[in-house]
Image: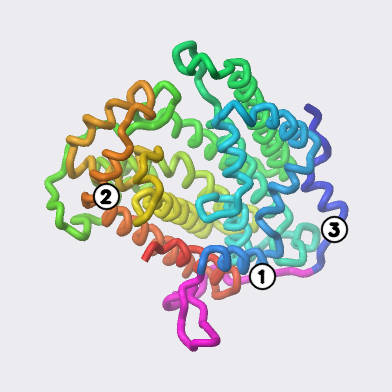
Amino acid sequence: MNVARSPTAVRMLRNGPASRVVRRRLYAPSSGVIGTRCDGNRGRLQKPDWNRAVSEAEKVVGYPSSFLSLRWLLSDEIANVALHLRRMVSSNHPLLKTVKGLLSNCQSNMQAWGLIVLLVSKAAGHINVDSSADEDKSGVLRSQRALAEIAEMIRTSHLMHNGLINIYPEMLPKSVDHDDMSFGNKIGLLSGDYLLANSFYELSMLKNQNLMELISSALRDLSEAEFVGRRDSQNNPLPSPFEPLDRKLSSARLRFNPLQPSGKLRGGMPLTPALRDWTRRNVLSAGSLLGKSCQGALLLAGHGERLQKQGFLFGKHLSLAWQAYLDLEPFLSGSPYSLGISFNLTSAPVMFHLEHDSSLFKEIDKGINSVQDVDYVKVHDVVIKGPGINYTKQLQKEHSKKAMEVLNVFEESDARTALSNIIIAMDRE
């Protein structure tokens, strides 16, 4: 496939140089609670809903997050992929579910990653940068916009590659055409490779060696995440056995700080085995990319290592809060998952329950060959009666709180408020 001129370069040629220079203070005094909005009709503070929070955030940066997917869809290469996907409609290949998830605009879809990077960029401002040649009208550097697109392309390529399946004779019933499944693998592999190659082509156009090293390390972490813990024959994750803790089922709160580091473990891993395992998996598979993208945005803006570190911590804590939020979804009241729909067996509620009651491993171990062999109705019923849900809610609040604390290093602005609204919108309470 031929890669055309970088879209970043095309936009720079079309838009021409900007003339406005933005210089902001690196740090602002800590303020109180931020991120709530006032209901004008009732005169009281109200929690922002998800769609509204994202919509308002897009107005702040002047750049709808859905534009990234639209641009890919309009490219010749992705248009060809879409045509080939029509052949797979009847094959039930996992790639179809992946594509559907990428195109849906819902709270469980993290299309907003690029938006988060842009909001962090605008909240921090920029210094020691020739903004007359690299800034657009919204106050965000064009290089930062390119980085936001790169982060989403890398994430999307990773999801496309995860949609591949291992094909072997005993895996599928005779009624399923192996050729269709193999064709789906080829489309997923080539599509993911194209996006990944294009993302690093765009990254090279920014001509920043430190940024290249930073984002490359995030890609390394994505790869490492696929080798953490036990896996079934399709590489679906399974929780690994660990020593159970002595906890009371009626306990409403954890007896430890979920974010307390243990020794010098990378990423501030928590103390208990279940939390350490869950955090490691999700920092590698998501937190590293979002955190390092936010860090890279501040690097492009000319900020020092201290603020860059805060950018990384914000992205990491936000992604972990987001993951804990998603992990709770199968166990909400009225959830269709109670009917036997499969869910992530390494989600926080399951991991916490296993630490409380290791007997559930007997059921989960049935998924060594395939996670579809697990009785999800039984696992769901057991977990929902245990302490894991309350622990996960607390974990989500702890990471949200940490992300909010990092926001206080930025001066008060619409971008900071938009970020806080996104965090508040994730609260399950």
Residue depth check, mark 1 versus mark 3: number of the one nearer the observer: 3
The residue that appears at 61% across and 39% down in the rendered structure is 99
Residue hosting label 3: 15
Q: Alpha carbon of mark 2 to alpha carbon of mark 1: how far?
A: 51 Å
Distance of mark 1 from mark 3, alpha carbons? 22 Å
Residue at x-position 30% and y-position 59% = 394
Marks 2 & 1, CB-CB < 8 Å contact = no
Residue on which the image places disc 2? 384
Residue 280 seen in the current view: yes
Q: Is residue 298 visible?
A: no
What is the number of the mark on residue 409?
A: none
* Residue 102 at x, y percent in the picture: 60, 44
> In the rendering, which numbered label is found on residue 23?
1
Q: Amino acid at mark 2?
A: Ile
User: Of the residues shown, which amino acid type is indicated by label 1?
Assistant: Arg
Viewer-nearest of discs 3 and 2: 2
Report the side of 347 relative to 77 (left or right).
Answer: left
Image position, residue 325 (x, y; %): 41, 54
